Image (spheres, rainbow, N blue to C red):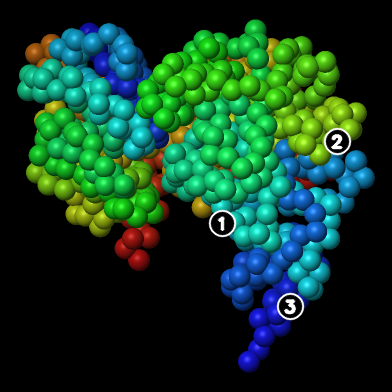
Amino acid sequence: MISMNFINVCTIILTKIVIWMLNLIGKKAGTIPGRIALKLNKNIRDYIKVNGKIIVVTGTNGKTTTTTMISEVLTKSEKRVIYNKGGNNIGWGITTTLIKNCKLNGIIDTDYLVLETDEHWVPVIFSKPNLKIDTLIILNFFRDQLDRAGEIETIVLKLENFIQNYNCNLILNGNDPNVIRIGDKNETGKNYYFGIKKLSTSHTYSEDKMEGIICPYCKIPLDYEYYQYAHIGKFKCKKCNYGDIKLDIEVSKIDRSQFYVGKTIYETNNENLYHIYNLLSIIALGKIYNLNDEILKKVFYNYEDKNGRHQTFKIDGKVCTLNLGKNPTGFNVVLKSIKQKDEEKELLIVLNDKENDGHDVSWIWDIDFNNLESFNKIICSGTRAYDMAITIKCSNFPKAKIVVEHNKEKAIKQLLETNNKKYIISNYSPLVEVKEILESLERK
Amino acid sequence: MNLNILCLYPNIMDLYGDNGNIEIIKYRALKRGIEVNIDAYTINDEDPDFYNYDLVFLGGGSDKEQKVVAKDIIKFKKQIERSINIGIFYLLICGGFQLFGKYYKDSENNIIEGLNIFNYYTESSTNKKERCIGNIVIKSQIENNNLEILGFENHGGQTYNVDTPLGEVLYGNGNTFKNKFEGLKKENVIGTYLHGPLLSKNPELADYIIKYCLERKYNKKITLKKLDDEFEIKAKKEMLDKLLTTSKS
């Protein structure tokens, strides 16, 4: 009989060869190696042992950026760090990361393993003691691709179940009613909540579609003191006080790019509120692992996305900013900040309905397309360009200023025809291609 | 002319951009110089006067949200029943469609009482993964014309005992897994699982509702001016070509 150990070692070797071959032909080792490994040996992850602390980042929006920044902070703190680059955050992709970095005996030798993980996959991957999470960060839960990801309620219930008796640190968005629920179930571990105090930009009504506005215990609508955006804000159930929590990391004031946490002032190059929330989770992490505040400050100030999220390109002297918008809340935050800029501008929106986008595009009707007057032209591209065009037209933006061009390269060239400021918002699957087209144009 | 629209629980029952249906009605009405007034009713609001409206709309929500709405809407049963009888138009999507039947049994076997206005009832599989999810095309008769209606279904509930469906399924599931029929259609009621939102790629259906409401209200024959539906027609054609040719091969 062949021993299990032998099969494990063979799987690791073969998978490492696949990763090596993919790299050789200039491809990234994304999901394919992990997929092959699991096909060969479905329990291969049980063989992995991590000599270091596992940090997991989950939630709907902000996983990739937060994970990358955490890795940067840890690296600058002279720690050994392994993380899943480029957002391969479900079973296959994470298995690739694990095997790529383990020795033949299955051991990953590092100080920190930082993994962004799809909400559904957290309980699947981290239930066994060999992959025990030390700190789990939950950023937010928004309405995402419903046909693929399911309703938020399903995700929350899965995570509630998972966290009971698990015993890890939880870093939670204290302004998200769907997230703090999970803290209630963490009876053995410690919870760290982050949030932002009422600002001049906070409002008493929500401009976006909301999720989780009902108290999970009393089933009555929650009372909001203020909203920051979507359902993120300060809320309380008048019957059971759900939501009345003490924040461990609280922003007291935001002054343009500077934000105040206690006596410390941090500065960021992306002033969007959703980004500041991401940064707060990193500050909380810094408290847990005693990281130097000066390093955090440096990373916050200098960090520049290279993954198509808030990435800027200069092509023939024209400035073009690319952003990801894969669900209504994320899209709204990005679009709102573009709308507010007082300048002549044009917009390209790329919308696909591939497997990892979700085949259902009805979420685009939850985007706030009012007040688009400042755009000279809006180009719609991707497999569902016409759906996007209908939505924009019905928001009363003149049809004559809407262009449909399925081909992404042609759409980008059309966008670049004038000298005005350019913006691109893309959903998930076209993002990398759009980014690569822009990079190649930038090089020319 | 004007249209008076009542949206029920729009902040709770709007899981799949369903409120877009009302934006579309508003857009198409305004383009023809028809004024539109939209009121919303949700929990803790003052009771609406149903008889004041030409169109009442209710979208879909998650099980949790549906439970909360079911408890509240029951107090309006009489008004809703009477307003349907006098011809006010009701557009009901997904969870809204389910709530107008006898009951909805969720995946944990909890029974949510419906308004019991129609005879159908809905039951979910206890396996949460068993859902009808995907693009769907149905063939319907609207004012004696055949119309292909395109949308996206995503429902765990299986709805049985619908006597007058909205259409025949050409692609997708329908009221239950692999059903021949989808939705419910009365002269002044459309209930359906189709998101998309429903009216976004089916402008003929939007116009049917607008025309019905105006003809009833003003008691005269109405002809709606044609609109530029280039995007809608092309969006629909692309999807129909993709779905109906793959299903045949």
Q: Earlier in the sequence, mark 3 or mark 1?
A: 3
The answer to whether residue A338 is above or below residue A381 is: above
Chain bearing tag 3 is A
Q: Where is residue A314 in the image (x, y as percent from the top left)?
A: 81, 32
The answer to whether residue A393 is above or below residue A343 is: below
Q: Where is residue A220 in the image (x, y as percent from the top left)?
A: 37, 23
Residue type at the position of mark 1 = Val
| Badge 2 density bin: few <14, some 14–19, many ≥20, Cα 10 Å | some
The answer to whether marks 3 and 1 sit on the same chain is yes
The answer to whether residue B48 is above or below residue A431 is: above
Classify mark 2: helix, strand or loop.
loop
Q: Where is residue B151 in the image (x, y as percent from the top left)?
A: 34, 42
Q: Which disc, if any, is residue A291?
A: 2
Q: Do the residues labelled 3 and 1 touch (CB within 8 Å)?
A: no
Residue type at the position of mark 2 = Leu
Q: Which of marks 3 and 2 is nearer the N terminus?
A: 3
Chain bearing tag 1 is A
Q: Which disc, if any, is residue A124?
A: 1
Q: Residue furthest right?
A: A78
Residue designated by label 3: A9
The answer to whether marks 2 and 1 sit on the same chain is yes
Real-space Cα separation, disc 2 to disc 1, in angstroms: 30 Å
Q: Which disc, if any, is residue A164?
A: none
The answer to whether residue A51 is above or below residue B215 is: below
Along the horizontal axis of the image, is A422 left or right of B62?
right
Q: Residue at x 18, y 14 (%)?
A: B50
Q: Which residue lies furthest to the front in this view?
A: A188
Quarter residue A44 falls in:
bottom right
Residue type at the position of mark 3 = Val
Q: Which of B128 and A26 is in front in this view?
A: B128
Q: Which of A180 and A389 is in front in this view?
A: A180
